[in-house]
Image (cartoon, rainbow, N blue to C red):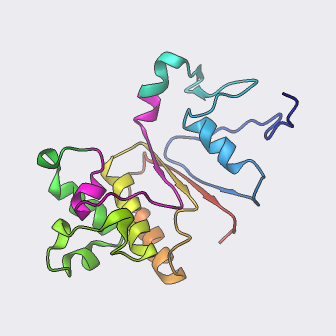
Amino acid sequence: KNLPKVLENFHLKIKKGSWIGIVGETGSGKSTLIDIIMGLLEPTDGGLYIDERLLGFNDLKSWQTKIAHVPQVIFLTDASISENIAFGVNSNEINHDLVKRSAKIAQISETIEALPDAYNTHVGERGVKLSGGQRQRIGIARALYKQAEIIIFDEATNALDSLKEASVMKALENLDKNITVIMIAHRLS
């Protein structure tokens, strides 16, 4: 098909442990770039190189396990807060200390611990029992629980007010210095 290229003559080098922001208006290629970085899209030309080695099909799963993605809209199941933070982990294998640590960094632990059932509280279908900001912070805690080497925040703080966004960002500064953070946003702030 003769569709226009979203990204052309594009080269980006990201050093491990760095924090980068990708800012641009709708349609500027932010999502395409992230999908390429996450190995969800294959570039039509060129490739994705990790440590100067072309990422091949056989390396894809290994690469993707190193990445945690925090989208703008967080998918939550009708399960407990712990199960939603440790998403994909059998309930009897959840590391509850890591759940609590992740929630603390995501600035949601005090809210959770004030609930009658705390981390055992069920969130309802798609998290209906939580506010948008609470769902977002659970999504951030989920990414932290995964202990990924790369965390991609895709408009992930949009549902937070500016004070909560600033406190989450401040808490994220305490992450391991080897974690690479990529933030995608429409607005520069």
Q: Quadrant of residue 124?
A: bottom left
> Is residue 1 rendered magenta in the image?
no
Q: Is residue 35 above or below residue 1?
A: below
* Residue 25 spot, x, y in % from top left: 76, 61
Q: Is residue 91 above or below residue 3?
A: below
Which residue appears at 85% of the width and 35% of the height?
Answer: 3
Q: Quadrant of residue 66?
A: top left
| Residue in the foreground of this view, choosing between 139 and 75 | 75
Q: How many marks?
A: 0
| Residue in the foreground of this view, choosing between 80 and 69 | 80
Which residue appears at 63% of the width and 28% of the height?
Answer: 48
Q: Which residues are magenta?
A: 62-88
Q: Is residue 14 above or below residue 26?
A: above
> Is residue 79 rendered magenta in the image?
yes
| Residue in the foreground of this view, choosing between 5 and 3 | 3
Q: Quadrant of the C terminus?
A: bottom right
Q: In the shown orientation, is residue 29 left or right of residue 17? A: right
Q: Residue furthest front?
A: 125
Q: Quadrant of residue 34?
A: top right
* Residue 69 spot, x, y in % from top left: 48, 49
